[in-house]
Image (spheres, rainbow, N blue to C red):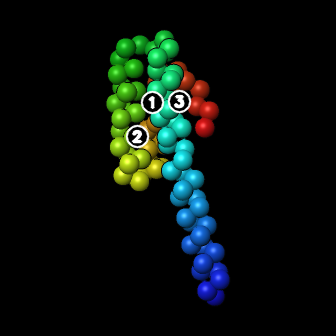
Amino acid sequence: MKKILVLIVSMFLVTTSAYAKVCPKLIAQFDADVKTTKAKADDVTKAKKLRADGEKLHNDKTHDKSEAALRDALKLIGSKVTN
C-alpha cells in the first residue's frame, strides 16, 4: 500500500513540474514573436496584458491558468503556439 501511495504522489509531482516548464517557454516565445507581429495595436495591448497575467499566474504556481493566458496572448498576436 505504501508503494502505491508513493507512486501516486511521485506521479503528481512529475506532472506538476512538467507544467511549470511550459510557461517560461510560452513567455519566451511571446517575447520573441511580439517584436515582429503584424497584429492590430489593440490586440497587441490585450496580448501584453495576458502575457503579464500569465507570468503572474506562473509565479503563483497556477500553471494551468498561466498556460491558457499565455496561449491566448500568442493567438492574439498571430503566433502559432509551438509548445
Please tell me whether residue 55 is drawn above or below residue 9 in the rendered image: above
Binning the other alpha carbons within 10 Å of mark 3 as few (below 14), some (14 to 19) or many (20 upward) gives: some
Camera sees residue 10:
yes
Q: Which residue is mark 1?
A: 73
Task: Name above or below for residue 62 compared with residue 71.
Answer: below
Q: Give the secondary structure at mark 1.
A: helix
Instruction: Give the structural element (helix, strand or loop) at label 3.
Output: helix
Percent across and percent down for residue 31 are 46, 26
The disc at residue 29 is 3
For the residues labelled 2 and 3, the Cα–Cα distance comes to 13 Å
Q: Which residue is mark 2?
A: 54
Local packing at callout 1 (Cα closer than 10 Å; few below 14, some 14-19, many 20+) is many
Q: Residue at x 54, y 51 (%)?
A: 19
Q: Is residue 51 left or right of residue 9?
A: left
The amino acid type, in three-letter code, at marker 3 is Gln
Q: Residue at x 61, y 67 (%)?
A: 11
**Residue appearing at x 39%, y 20% in the figure:** 44
Q: Are marks 2 and 1 in contact (CB under 8 Å)?
A: yes
- How far, Cα to Cα, is label 3 from label 1? 10 Å
